[in-house]
């Protein structure tokens, strides 16, 4: 990057045990790289305490979210997990509901339950004027189905971000017809032959957010290693190169987008 500007990693699992041995050093590396804030996705009741502990340890720096991830929707436990989320929605300030969504790559055994959990959490978010972090993997048609069912019932969709976006430009064209949505761009954009690179070239810059999904999806040249938010500058540089603009322009635009979506 040409200079250091204020950056938010809008999807960072820095509360994972992967960082237990060097958490403070990892945060120091992030700050040195200009990454000053982190949005912490919720996945299930199992990670709830770690999310809260991380946010409380970094007030005004780490922003907690709550939600039931689609791969955590199990036939025998999903209703109890969803109730866990409901009971805690109004007990503290959340930055977003998520990550929520649909996944047919890792989990197809509970498809109907996934759709029910997704729909319910979208409605909760809209009722509370909270954005959503959307996880979609090999399941975009089911997302349309759930979106359309909410609209058909006369309800509104929340605003949100399609995290770790890997869809086509045509899918983006349909997404934007549903409302106020952004695309989360992470390390995959740096991979050789990554299809999302051609999307990043064409999507308006005011619809892009920076993220890592750490500890996963580390950008080149660190692919396969444990990821961390300090590597966002590599993602910024790739976006800047694809669009023919400066890294500073990318950072500034994404900072504005983050503020608009999350209010931070």
Image: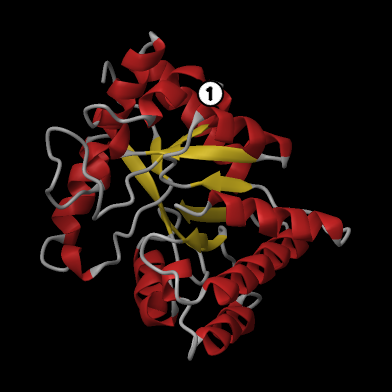
Q: Nearer the viewer, residue 134 or 174?
A: 174
Q: Quadrant of the N terminus?
A: top left
Q: Tag 1: Cα neighbours inside 10 Å, few (<14), some, or many (≥20)?
A: some
Please determine whether, in this image, residue 182 is positioned above or below residue 106: above
Q: Name the residue under label 1.
A: 203
| In the image, residue 258 above or below residue 151 | above
Q: Image quadrant of residue 184?
A: top left
Q: Is residue 69 visible?
A: no
Q: Which of 74 and 6 is in front in this view?
A: 74
Residue 103 vertical position relative to residue 216 in the rendered view, above or below: below
89 to the left or right of 71: right
Place of residue 244 in the rendered image (x, y in percent of width and height, measured from the top left): 38, 8
Q: In which quarter of the image is residue 181?
A: top right
Q: Residue at x 23, y 32 (%)?
A: 191
How many numbered badges does the structure rendering display? Answer: 1
Q: Nearer the viewer, residue 35 or 135?
A: 135
Residue ranking furthest to the top: 244
Q: Residue 22 location, x and y as percent? A: 12, 61
Callout 1: SS:
loop
Colour theme: secondary structure
| Residue farthest right in this picture | 154
- Residue 49 drawn at (x, y percent): 38, 79
Q: Residue at x 56, y 58 (%)?
A: 95
């Amino acid at each position: 990057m040409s200079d250091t500007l204020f950056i938010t990693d809008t999807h960072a699992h820095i509360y994972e045990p992967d960082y237990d041995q060097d958490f403070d050093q990892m945060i120091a590396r992030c700050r040195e790289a200009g990454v000053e804030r982190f949005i912490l996705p919720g996945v299930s009741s199992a990670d709830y305490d770690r999310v809260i502990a991380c946010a409380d340890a970094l007030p005004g720096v780490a922003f907690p979210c709550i939600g039931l991830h689609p791969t955590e929707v199990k036939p025998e436990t999903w209703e109890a997990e969803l109730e866990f989320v409901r009971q805690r929605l109004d007990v503290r300030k959340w930055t977003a509901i998520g990550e929520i969504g649909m996944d047919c790559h890792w989990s197809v055994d509970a498809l109907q339950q996934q759709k029910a959990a997704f729909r319910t959490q979208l409605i909760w978010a809209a009722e509370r004027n909270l954005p959503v972090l959307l996880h979609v993997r090999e399941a975009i048609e089911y997302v349309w189905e759930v979106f359309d069912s909410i609209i058909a019932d006369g309800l509104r969709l929340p605003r949100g971000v399609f995290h770790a976006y890997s869809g086509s430009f045509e899918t983006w064209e349909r997404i934007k017809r549903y409302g106020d949505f952004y695309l989360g761009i992470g390390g995959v954009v740096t991979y050789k032959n990554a299809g999302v690179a051609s999307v990043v070239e064409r999507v308006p810059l005011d619809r892009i957010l920076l993220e890592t999904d750490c500890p996963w999806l580390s950008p080149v040249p660190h692919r396969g290693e444990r990821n961390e938010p300090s590597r966002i500058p590599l993602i910024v540089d790739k976006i800047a190169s694809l669009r023919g603009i400066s890294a500073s322009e990318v950072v500034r635009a994404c900072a504005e987008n983050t503020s608009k979506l999350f209010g931070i």
